[in-house]
Image (cartoon, helix red, strand yellow):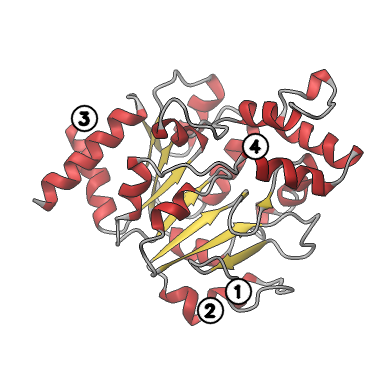
Amino acid sequence: MDTTKMAAIRSALADGALIPYIGPGVLSLTGAACPLPASHEALAARLTAKTSVPHKLRGNLTGAAQFIENFKHRKSVVALMKAAFADEVAPSALHRFLADQRALPLLVHAWYDDLPQRALAWRTDWGMVQGLSQAEHFGQWTRHYRPDGTATDDLHGVANDAAVHHSSEVAAWRTLLYQPFGSVAPAANFLVSDSDFVEVLTEIDIQTPIPDSVKSIRAGRHFLFLGCRFATQLERIFAHQITKRSSDRHWACLPETPTRNEARFLAQHGIERIDMPLEAFTDELAATDHAVAA
């Protein structure tokens, strides 16, 4: 990898100016036998394995989840999602490396597993904010949680994130873990069905579903995308909206050949592609970190 590019990433990370944005592909770093679904397609297959869903929807995660929600119940979707991410998996070297960065202000985790929480468990100076489904929490877009999984500031019924943003407890967290799609832990919050995302997408242009705590932290900072693709419109919309009003220089470890839409997205958002396997990139970043620390 270009040493100048790695030096820029490392410097931004050390200065607290870098925000990692990790996706389902990061689960590949836990080993080939990882039991957790590591892609939209794999999760869709898991949800439909024991449920009768039309063939045309079986590879469509949001569509399959919507079908199950419509013809069974929202509780069925939640139960299937919890089962899909129920296995306990040890955090990868990348998860542990990021959790060790005490200058890290924000970590975006765009998947449903709880490995980032597990990696951060040794610390007490962090907290979480997760997206909420309007089907279960109408009028409230997000909820903040302490490291022990309890909601902070009794957020039940609080519709305005500004009240949370000004909380002294939230302000004291050195690292905020943002999970826009929810997570299996601590409360099984999931944005996964078509209707879940329709609700969010109707408001996301005006940033209503984005927590004020995230808006404040991202200003002027760079993003580093790891284990992410930008192949679908949904992936691109969330990456665009979460990175709004940040820096004009970002990076993405993307060893796969970008699609035409991905290439256009990278160019439009000032995202420099790093063409190397994620594991090799992680090893190089950690080795650089150790070399600097030594």
Q: Residues within 10 Å of mark 3 (few under 14, many from 20)?
A: few
Residue at 48% across, 81% down: 168
Q: Quadrant of residue 225?
A: top left
Tag 4 and tag 3, C-beta contact below 8 Å: no
User: Quadrant of the rendered structure where residue 278 is?
Assistant: top left
Label 4 sits on residue: 234
Element carrying mark 3 = loop
The residue type indicated by label 4 comes to Leu
Q: Are marks 1 and 2 in contact (CB under 8 Å)?
A: yes
Indicate whether 123 appears above or below 261.
below
Q: Is residue 47 left or right of residue 294?
A: right
Where 62 sits versus 98, above or below?
above
Between the residue at mark 2 and the residue at mark 3, the CA separation in whole angstroms equals 41 Å
Answer with mark 1 or mark 4, whichever residue precedes in sequence.
1
Q: Earlier in the sequence, mark 2 or mark 3?
A: 3
Q: Which residue is mark 3?
A: 2
In the rendered structure, which amino acid carries the disc numbered 3? Answer: Asp
Return the residue at label 2. Answer: 166
Instruction: Give whichever of discs 4 and 3 has the lower sequence position.
Output: 3
- Is residue 246 shown left or right of residue 83? left
Q: Give residue 248's position: percent from left, percent from top.
A: 40, 46
The residue type indicated by label 1 comes to Ala
Residue position for label 1: 162
Q: Nearer the viewer, residue 33 or 15?
A: 33
